[in-house]
Image: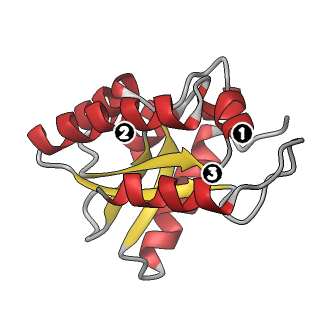
Amino acid sequence: MPSFDKDTKVRIINRLVECGFHELEVTSFVSPRAVPQLQDADEVIKEIDRNQPVILRALVPNERGLERAHALGIKKVKLMLSGSDSHSLYNANANTFDALERYRSVAEKALTYNMKMTGSIAVAFGCLMKEKYQLNAMKKSVQSMHN
């Protein structure tokens, strides 16, 4: 799958900051095997102009991703829960319940680092995978993430 090179990513991020954006999600600290387009995440973060007043946010799928974000000075992280088990198994290699349990430990560790957190629910309004959409399961996911 095509991707921008590192220098182009850095240039785009820096220009968005120059345009006045106050917060940007700049990368995801995911496995390079799973998403090779983001294998340069650490280098991109290191080269972003940090002299501008901007909050850099990154998606962290697990504790390893959180550790990478923390080591690079990221102050805000995003945890993403899937609204469907089939998507969660594909995306996080765990069903929704197990992924949520994993995120609890990530969130607890992020708090010890004084990092701010946001959350999102992937496929919140339906999933293209062959699974009947369950509104009650989605409500449960949202409640669990909120808690």
Left or right: 140 as drawn, with respect to 94: left
Q: In the image, what residue type sits under mark 3? A: Gly
SS for dot 1: helix
Please provide percent x and percent y for residue 40: 55, 30
Q: Report if the CB atoms under discs 2 and 3 are less than 8 Å apart.
A: no
- Picture disc at residue 87: 1
Please provide percent x and percent y for residue 116: 23, 56
Q: Is residue 95 visible?
A: yes
Residue 135, picture quadrant: bottom right
How many labels were placed on the picture? 3
State the colouring used for the structure image: secondary structure
Left or right: 2 as drawn, with respect to 8: right
- Measure the alpha-carbon separation of dots 2 and 1: 32 Å
Left or right: 116 as drawn, with respect to 142: left
- Measure the alpha-carbon separation of dots 2 and 3: 33 Å
Which residue is at a point 61% across and 22% down the rendered structure image?
32
- Picture disc at residue 46: 2
